[in-house]
Amino acid sequence: MIETIATAESNRELAPGYRMLTINLIEDVRVNPGQFAMLKPRGSLEPLLRRALAIYRVEGPQRLSFLYQVLGRGTTALAQLREKDEVEALLPLGNSWSIETSGGGGAIVVAGGIGSASLLMLCEELKRLRVDTKLLFGAATERAAAGCGLEDFRALDLPSIVTTDDGSLGDKELVTAPLERELREHGHKGSTIYACGPWPMMRRVAEIAAQFKTRCLVSLEAPMGCGFGVCVGCVVAVNTGGPLDYGSYKRVCTDGSIFPSEAIRWEVNAMTH
Ligand SMILES: Cc1cc2nc3c(=O)[nH]c(=O)nc-3n(C[C@H](O)[C@H](O)[C@H](O)COP(=O)(O)OP(=O)(O)OC[C@H]3O[C@@H](n4cnc5c(N)ncnc54)[C@H](O)[C@@H]3O)c2cc1C
């Protein structure tokens, strides 16, 4: 992990409310798929805290891209960055997607909305490793799909299904519907599901994975203060196992952001997420 000042190279709008920020670092970093960064414009006091963004793409050892949705104060401040502006960056953070190839099973990648940002590098790696991969890509609308990087995923040429909530692109259904069909109709024995998206989506993905006894990893997006385990602002309720399972808590920043789906106490976390 390094704490550094980076320089913005570009900060393009991909669709209304969705942007791609590319930054240059002054030292090399090694990033694994699924890791994230904490970012804010240099010297910004409003907001004070950096915001968590998945590392979308590594374009070189010192050049990284981030795909983000402009939601509130932090992402609005990031949206103001212009070429050559300085960015306070803490990275790379968190664990990474663990790709299971030993069982001979394939991969089903479920991207919901801006959760896609955590999954592009994973898809690139699955393709490089020649893992049989199916991509399920869901967004609210055709515009949102463009904002969530659909073209970059399409460029990988993986078998894929696109869904939108309003039917403006692909099938009009939730992205969990084709996941259920895939497992029901094709079995996908020994496969792993990799998912990132809104909490209700991931909860449903976890239920489907449990129903079909399929290994499932989820990357959680929890409001986060520090990014390195000190503030404990991002904790989520997890199962501890055993007959007297009262549960416990894990930090999304340092214990995650990627967890086995069965480790998460979805019903408890639903009260806050
Ligand atoms: C590990 C990780 C990786 C992430 N990667 C990306 C990414 O690649 N692209 C992207 O667009 N977003 C990503 N997020 C979510 C992003 O951090 C939040 O959208 C951002 O912090 C919102 O800050 P804000 O100041 O703009 O909004 P705020 O004013 O803080 O909040 C606006 C709304 O977003 C909700 N919110 C705030 N923080 C988070 C959060 N961390 N996760 C989910 N909802 C939140 C609030 O409840 C509120 O409804 C990631 C979050 C985590 C934890």
Image (tube, rainbow, N blue to C red):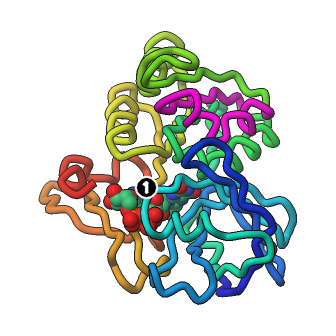
- Quadrant containing ligand 1: bottom left
Q: Quadrant of the C terminus?
A: bottom left
Front residue (pair 219, 69): 69
Front residue (pair 212, 218): 218
Q: How crowded is mark 1: few (under 14 residues within 10 Å), some or many (20 or more)?
A: many
Q: Is residue 189 left or right of residue 123?
A: left
Task: Describe the element under mark 1 as helix, strand or loop.
Answer: loop
Q: Is residue 267 left or right of residue 224?
A: left
Q: Whole-percent x and y of residue 36?
A: 59, 65
> Does 218 appear above or below 172?
below
Q: Does mark 1 have its CB less than 8 Å from ligand 1?
A: yes
Residue at x-position 32% and y-position 34%? 207
- Is residue 144 in the magenta section? yes
Residue type pointed to by label 1: Leu
What's the magenta region? Answer: 132-156
Residue at x-position 69% and y-position 86%? 4
- Is residue 37 in the magenta section? no
Q: Whole-percent x and y of residue 246?
A: 14, 62
Which residue matches tag 1?
Answer: 220
Q: Whole-percent x and y of residue 127?
A: 78, 37
State which quadrant residue 269 falls in. Answer: bottom left
